[in-house]
Image (cartoon, rainbow, N blue to C red):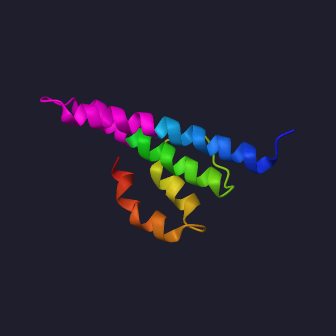
């Protein structure tokens, strides 16, 4: 039987892998001569959301199914206030 911290670590890695994939798609879209801005913004938002969810899982903070970056930052603030504060502009995504 796996220990809870191993399960959590794998869950974090899963979120990071998904976020990294969205980030790479956004990079490719941004490099295009005629970037598809809506698709680019979507993948930026998705990457930010998934990176935040990885942080929340890492800190053992549960969250509901949401795409609201501000809500995720609010949940993160008690354990990583500096990070949450510095990323507040990401709510525009």
Residue at 34% from the left image edge and 32% from the top image edge: 25
Residue at 74% from the left image edge and 46% from the top image edge: 6
Decide if residue 31 is in sight here.
yes
Q: Position of residue 88 (x, y in %)?
A: 40, 61
Decide if residue 66 is in sight here.
no
Residue at 60% from the left image edge and 67% from the top image edge: 79
Say if the magenta span includes residue 17.
no
| Magenta residues, dominant SS class | helix
> Which residue occupies the foreground of this view, 57 or 37?
57
Q: Give the vertical position of 69 relative to 21 (above or below).
A: below
Q: Which residues are magenta?
A: 20-44
Q: Position of residue 13 (x, y in %)?
A: 59, 42
Say if the magenta span includes residue 30.
yes
Residue that lies at the very extreme toward the right in this rendered image: 1
- Left/right placement of residue 29 relative to residue 18 reads left
- Left/right placement of residue 15 relative to residue 46 reads right
> Which residue occupies the foreground of this view, 24 or 35?
24
Q: Position of residue 87 (x, y in %)?
A: 40, 60
């Amino acid at each position: 039987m796996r220990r809870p911290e191993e399960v959590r670590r794998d869950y974090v890695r899963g979120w990071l892998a998904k976020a990294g994939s969205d980030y790479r798609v956004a990079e490719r879209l941004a490099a295009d001569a005629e970037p598809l801005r809506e698709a680019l913004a979507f993948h930026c938002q998705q990457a930010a959301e998934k990176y935040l969810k990885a942080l929340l899982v890492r800190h053992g903070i549960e969250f509901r199914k949401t795409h609201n970056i501000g809500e995720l930052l609010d949940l993160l603030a008690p354990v990583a206030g500096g990070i949450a504060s510095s990323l507040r502009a990401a709510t525009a995504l």
